[in-house]
Amino acid sequence: MCLAIPAKVISVQEDKAKVDFGEGVLREVNVTLVSAKVGDYVLVHAGYAIQVLDEKEAEETIQLWNEILEAETSKD
């Protein structure tokens, strides 16, 4: 199974972008597959932005991920 996680684009330089996955998690990803600009949300898989997301869709997905992670940590 492959997972792609939404992240907000903080900066773009050529084919690389710094993205924010939330809670201070910043990473550099390759954006050659999409037309992303600062402020956009992108779907990231294996270090590549593979799709630009609508802000509402991205925020809903992030909320679902947070719920899943909370449920997992409460099991321990």
Image (spheres, grey):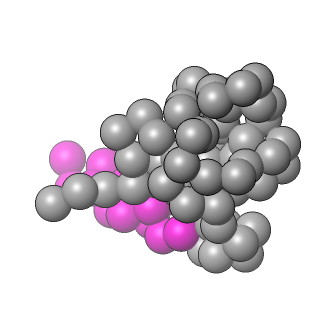
Q: Quadrant of residue 70?
A: bottom left
Reply yes or no: does residue 72 show up in magenta.
yes
User: Which residue is more in the foreground, 72 or 3?
Assistant: 3
Image check: 37 left or right of 53?
right
Compared to 12, does 41 lie above or below?
below
User: Which residue is more in the foreground, 75 or 2?
Assistant: 2
User: Which residue is more in the foreground, 2 or 72?
Assistant: 2
Q: Position of residue 44 (x, y in %)?
A: 48, 48
Compared to 26, does 35 lie above or below?
below
Residue ranking furthest to the right? 38
Image check: 51 left or right of 18?
left
Q: Quadrant of residue 32?
A: top right
Compared to 68, does 13 lie above or below?
above
User: Which residue is more in the foreground, 14 or 51?
Assistant: 14
Q: Position of residue 28 (x, y in %)?
A: 57, 25
**Quadrant position of the N terminus in the picture:** bottom left
Image check: 40 left or right of 60?
right
- At a point 23% along the width and 56% down the height, the residue shown is 2
Image check: 61 left or right of 56?
left
Q: Position of residue 14 (x, y in %)?
A: 72, 26
- At a point 39% along the width and 47% down the height, the residue shown is 45
- Main secondary structure type of the part rendered in magenta: helix
Is residue 15 visible in the rendered image? The answer is yes
- At a point 31% along the width and 56% down the height, the residue shown is 3
Q: Position of residue 57 (x, y in %)?
A: 64, 75
Reply yes or no: does residue 66 show up in magenta.
yes
Is residue 62 visible in the rendered image? The answer is no
Q: Which residues are magenta?
A: 61-76
- At a point 65% along the width and 67% down the height, the residue shown is 53
